[in-house]
Amino acid sequence: MKDLLRLKSSLTEEIEAILNEQIRREAHSSSLYLSMASWCDRNGYDNSANYFYKQSDEERQHMLKIFKYVLDLGGSAVSPTITDIKFEFNSFREIFEEALEQEVIITQSINNIVDRCHKAKDFMTVEFMNWFLNEQKEEEYVARRALELFDVIGEEGTGRWEIDKQVPKIKYDND
Ligand SMILES: [Fe+2]
Ligand SMILES: [Fe+2]
């Protein structure tokens, strides 16, 4: 029965597996950003907390987008288990360093998926993943700009208060 269903799917087992791995990575990002929101909230950075709540929501939407794609193509989407999300961070700045690091890891992972789809001649999934490549361009820009604020504004005096105010205002301008 499984083999018969497989005939009805354009997804190979290999591509289905790496898409499920990406579902897990997006869910991990969502949980990590939620934890960052908690830290910011506990430490008085309310605007940044809201920024990370929003980021967390977006990552969940990314997860669902892939989840539904896998199912639409007749594959099996697996609801991921996420454990070991860190609760403590050493500083306000460290949160933004880790957020940028996380986005860069996700971009590499998506590049890897596109590469493997090309090799498998799965151009439908290549087309689908293009949306994620564009999204990563924006997400990396915003994460990098947030971190830049620590140098441009400076952390001394009311610096961190000002940075917290500016973080949600960062916009990616495509022009
Ligand atoms: Fe994402
Ligand atoms: Fe992201």
Image (cartoon, helix red, strand yellow):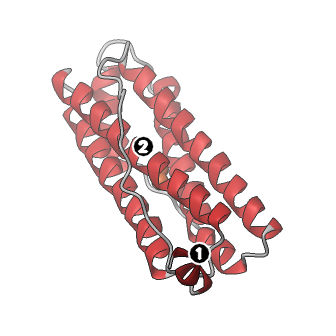
| Mark 1, other Cα within 10 Å: few <14 / some 14–19 / many ≥20 | some
Residue at point 58%, 64% (across, down):
16
Q: Secondary structure at mark 2?
A: helix
- Asked where in the image residue 35 lies, by quadrant, the reply is top left
- Ligand 1 neighbours mark 2 (CB distance < 8 Å): yes
Viewer-proximal residue among 109 and 98: 109
Residue 138: image x %, image y %? 54, 56
Q: Secondary structure at mark 1?
A: helix
- Asked where in the image residue 153 lies, by quadrant, the reply is top left
- Asked where in the image residue 90 lies, by quadrant, the reply is top left
Residue at point 30%, 54% (across, down):
57
Residue at point 44%, 75% (across, down):
71
- Where is mark 1, residue-wise? 128
Vertical relation: 87 (above or below) 121: above
Viewer-proximal residue among 74 and 43: 74
Vertical relation: 164 (above or below) 5: above
Viewer-proximal residue among 20 and 86: 20
Instruction: Please state which amino acid type lies under the numbered disc 2.
Output: Ser
| Mark 2, other Cα within 10 Å: few <14 / some 14–19 / many ≥20 | many
Instruction: Please state which amino acid type lies under the numbered disc 1.
Output: Phe
- Where is mark 2, residue-wise? 29
Residue 107: image x %, image y %? 62, 50
Assign the C terminus to one quadrant of the image: bottom right
Vertical relation: 17 (above or below) 148: below
Tell me, yes or no, if residue 34 can be seen here: yes
Q: Horizontal placement of 99 versus 164: left or right?
A: right
